[in-house]
Each structure stands twice: as C-alpha cells, then as structure tokens.
Image (tube, helix red, strand yellow):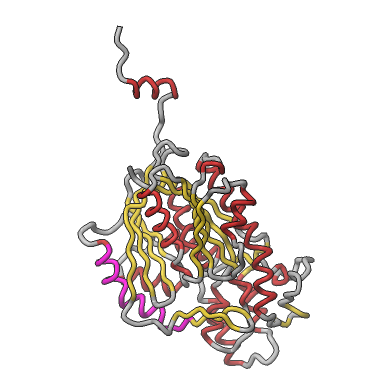
Amino acid sequence: MSTRIVSIGTAVPPTRIGQERVRDLFAAQPGVDRLTRRLIHAAFDASAIESRHTVLAELDPGSDAQPGGDASFIDGGTLLSPTTGPRNDLYIRAAPGLCAEAARSALADAEIEASAVTHVVTVSCTGFYAPGPDYRLVRDLGLPTTVERYHLGFIGCAAALPGLRLASRITAAQPGAVVLVVCAELCSLHIRASSDPQQIVAASVFADGAAAAVVTADPDRGRAGGLELDRFGTALTGEGEKDMVWTIGDNGFEMILSAEVPRIIGREIRSAVDRFLGSDGSPDAWAVHPGGRSVLDRVESGLDLTPDSLDRSRGVLRDYGNMSSATILFILRALLQDEAIGDGARVGALAFGPGLTVESALLTKRTPTATPPAGAREMAASGPVRA
C-alpha cells in the first residue's frame, strides 16, 4: 500500500505586485547612494521574478487598503521598520485564512471530506502564535476535534519535504490515516530598507503564499492518482552554516543569504543527489525549490540537467517568487496537473534550508484510471457469481 499525495491546493494574498514596482520602491528610499541603487537594480533585475503576492497591501500603489493594524510599512513612499510584535500580529491575522483556503482547495480536489482528516501537520517559519495554525485549521475547517496536530516551525525553505516525510511516517503506522500538510509563509512581513547586499537579495526574492497537501495510504480514500511518496533523504553540506541563517530581531526576522549559497549548492548538489538516488538513476522530472534564479542555475549545471528540466520551478519563481516552504508544493502541484508527465514518471524533489540543509524526496506520479461502478466493485470483491 503506497502513501500518496492525493491533491495539492494553493492560496496567495490578493495583492499582487510587479517586480519593477518593488525594485523602484527600494531604490528610492532616503539615504540610498549610487552603489546601493546599482546593487538593488542588479539583484531585482537578475531575479527572474515578474510578480509576487504580499499581505502588505500598502506595497501596491493602487490599493486603498489601510495598514495592517498597528504595523504600518510605508509612509509617503518611505519604508518604515515596525518592531517584531506588530509584524507578528499581522501574521496572526493573515496566516489562518490562507491556510484554510489552501486546505479547502486541496480537500475539494481530493474529494475527501474534512471529517475524514485524522492528522494535521502545519509548517511555517515567518510567524508564531499559540494556539497556532494547526488549531485554527481544526476550527476553521470543522475538522474532528480528535485530530492529531503537529507543527514544524522555523525550518525554513526546506520544511515542506520534512512535513511530507512526517505524513508518510504517520500513514506507515496508521494506514487508514488522512494527513493534511499545510505550509504558510508571509515572508514580506519582514522586509526592511537596507544597504546590506544580503538583505537586498532577500528583499528581491521572498513572497507570501500557502499550500496544502492531502496525504493518505488508503487506496479507497479520495480520487485516484496522485504522487506516491517513495522515499526521503536529508543531508548537511560540508559548509554553509553561516551563509543561510534565519533569526528573530527586534524589527522583524532577519535573513542572512550570502552569495556563497548558490555556489555551495553547485559544488555539493551532485554528491548529495547521488547518495540519495543510489542505483535508482535520474528521475523523469524535477521539482527544485527556487531559492533564487542562481540556485536553479547551479542545480541545473551541477546535475547536468537539460535546459527544460526545471521549467516548472522557474515558472513558479517567475509568477510567485520564493514563498519559502510553500514553494515546493506549488511546483509539485504543477507537475501533478501536467498531462505531459505520464503514469509511472519518477519525480525528484529538492529543497534547501538553513545549515545548509538539502532535503530530498523521490515520488512516482500516478494518473487517475477509470473505475467500475460501485456495484461491479462489490461483485468483484465477493468473487464470481455462480448459478
């Protein structure tokens, strides 16, 4: 009995901003000198991002939305720097709705009732509160109050794969379980004006979004097909502990994202993937977390992939930016819906987090097949009818 992702649902905030708009906003901040302006233009223009979504409606010049409670991020075109408390308050208000929207979409697509969910796994690194998003999902979706709840916090961009791994472990122990894995990240809550190249790079790529996956090993639950979860792997690179760092500061969460990150990935991705795949050979399709355009470029060259191998990853980066942990589920959803990827195709998934950590997964796509009417299934199950 194979554990599978039956369906994936996604959700983004309604405010969509073009990359050029955000670039010009940062470049126009008071005190930005010529060198910093050049760095801002270079980072934003090289990102391969066209648009992103944000809970900060203030970033959209055409919006008449009011600031999110006590946290005002812009005043007359000047980026402000709210303290961490008001930023987190906005997370508490905005994250539950996105979680619920993505989860409802996933359950509807899976053709599974909310009452069938037995476990909830939530994933996030951009805010904290308790009772948390796992609790809110039970209340907002009307899940059974007996649902087991788990939260994976502050793992960073790689966290969706450990979330799916946990779901796989649960279904191995309880084959009838239905696990709802929900990732929600509001990265834009932590933006700040800065002349630091690492902060500029972070501001140029991060965005907001949520995604949910319905996971079960019960073949009679939900619609047919999906992505079978074959196995998982995790590895620490030999260096990078100080190159990708996520900490809590007085004025939001602070990201260190050095230029060494894509170089480290480029140097070590081949050995990490070879160890994970072993004798299985290269997958038919890839879902690679787009930490940025340069990360995808390094993975492509490091694994000797064809130019079109990462098209879905690049497409999600282009249209949504880097939504931290939720991003890989957006990519897997695109692969799940891609009719060009047929039954039995093997999918390799890679995501990268602080440490520097490489999380891997191997999946097999299963396409839905026609099923006989219920009566025929019952007759088949009871054996041949004899006169």
In the image, residue 254 sits, relative to residue 216, either above or below, namely below
In percent of width and height, residue 380 lies at 34, 22
Q: Is residue 31 visible?
A: yes
Q: Give whichever of 233, 208 is nearer the camera.
A: 233
Q: Nearer the viewer, residue 306 or 173?
A: 173
Q: Is residue 275 magenta?
A: yes
- Looking at the image, which is closer to me, 213 or 308? 213
Q: Residue furthest left?
A: 279
User: At 63% from the left edge and 84% from the top edge, which residue is drawn?
Assistant: 250
Does 212 appear in magenta? no
> Could you tell me residue 14's position as x and y percent?
67, 59
Question: Magenta segment, which residues?
Answer: 257-276
Furthest residue in direction front, as rendered = 146
* Residue under the point 42% across and 61% down: 161
Q: Nearer the viewer, residue 205 or 143?
A: 143
Q: Position of residue 222 (x, y in %)?
A: 47, 39
Q: Is residue 63 left or right of residue 175?
A: right
Is residue 213 toward the left or the right of residue 63 in the image? left
| Quadrant for the C terminus in the image | top left
| Image quadrant in which you'd find residue 218 | top left
Identity of the residue drawn at 50% across and 65% down: 317
Q: Is residue 371 above or below residue 144?
A: above
Q: Quadrant of residue 177?
A: top left
Query: Is residue 326 visible to the viewer in this orientation of the structure?
Result: no
Q: Quadrant of the N terminus?
A: top left
Give the left or right position of residue 32, taking residue 65 as reference: left
In this rendering, the answer to whether 350 lies above or below 7 is below
Q: Position of residue 310 (x, y in %)?
A: 40, 62
324 to the left or right of 302: right
Magenta span main SS: helix
